[in-house]
Amino acid sequence: MKYFQIYFLLIFSLLPLFGCEKFKKSTTKIDNKSYINDFVLLQENPNNQTSVKITSPNAIIDPTNNDIEIFESSIEIHNKNGQDFKVKSGNSTLNNLTNTIRVFNNVNISFLNNQDYYITTDSFDWDLNTSFIYINNSLNINFDTSNIIASKGLYNIDSSLLKIDNTEFNRNIYNSNDKEEYQIEIKSDFAKWFKKDNTLVFTSNDKQVETTINFLLTE
């Protein structure tokens, strides 16, 4: 109804006829897309027993390329072992032809069984037919009292394994009086985080892993 009101106002205005025609062409182009409020998409992958739920207050479906633009998206991923993680972002794009999703704009990945464990990054790409999520840009990882910076990463949903490159690990150690005693810094070419047993393994080319311990209290 809103579009018809705007159309009639323009007909009776003093704008040139050419301007009206240009507006009508633009309106026709917009009307080809479907605007959806309270968007919900459920998908299951029987090969790896993973289910994906995508929700958003607003989404746009473009029939010309089968893309779905999703705004303020929330993505929940559940694997065969139960709840895994949740992704929130400003935007995401789902391509129905290739069944791939690109998530971008303030991406936050939080693990559902531990809210103190989360990853922030700019974007990631995921072929929904597989269990691999590719993070091809820098990421910041928060594991409770530990922080890791890496240049890129790969998360395997099936094995709950996170692989990261060019890592810098930092952790603050506190005593019983809640005073910071020392800081640990580890630099490596590669690192792996095994979610199942919550362990980190650092490796480097030629077995070079640099570890620094800063003692803050000398009493």
Image: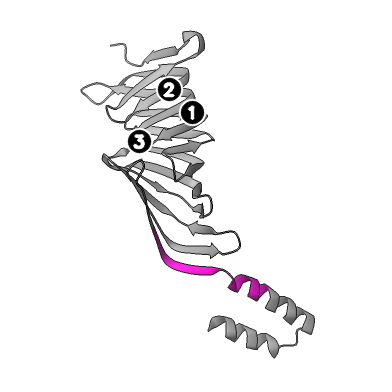
Where is mark 1, residue-wise? 150
Which x, y percent locates residue 140? Answer: 45, 34
Q: Amino acid at mark 3?
A: Asp
Circle 2 SS class: strand
Which residue type carries mark 1? Ala
Upstream in sequence: badge 2 or badge 1: 1
Q: Answer few, some or many: residues within 10 Å of disc 2's Cα (few below 14, many 20 plus, some between 14 and 19).
A: many
Disc 3 + disc 1, Cβ < 8 Å:
no
Horizontal relation, residue 99 to residue 117: left or right: right
Q: Estimate the spatial distance between the alpha carbons at disc 3 and disc 2, rounded to whole Å.
A: 18 Å
Q: In 3D space, how far apart are the residues under numbered discs 2 and 1 (Cα atoms)?
A: 9 Å
Vertical comparison of 203 with 154: above or below: above
Which residue in the protein does label 3 denote? 158
> Disc 3 or 2, which lies upstream in sequence?
3
Q: Which residues are magenta?
A: 26-41
Colour setup of the view? one colour
Density class for disc 1 (Cα within 10 Å; few <14, some 14-19, many ≥20) is many
Residue situated in front as seen by the camera: 13 or 95: 95
Query: Going 38% across and 18% down the picture, which residue do you hit?
Result: 184
Q: Which amino acid type is marked by label 2? A: Ala
Q: Position of residue 68 (x, y in %)?
A: 51, 59
Q: Please state if 177 lies on the left or on the right of 134 as rendered.
A: left
- As drawn, 31 above or below 148: below
Up the image or down, 32 lies above or below 164; here it is below
Identity of the residue furthest to the bottom in this view: 12
Around disc 3, counting alpha carbons within 10 Å, would you say few (fewer than 14), some (14 to 19), or many (20 or more)?
Answer: some
Front-most of 21 and 49? 49
Q: Residue at x 48, y 52 (%)?
A: 90
Residue 191's disc number: 2
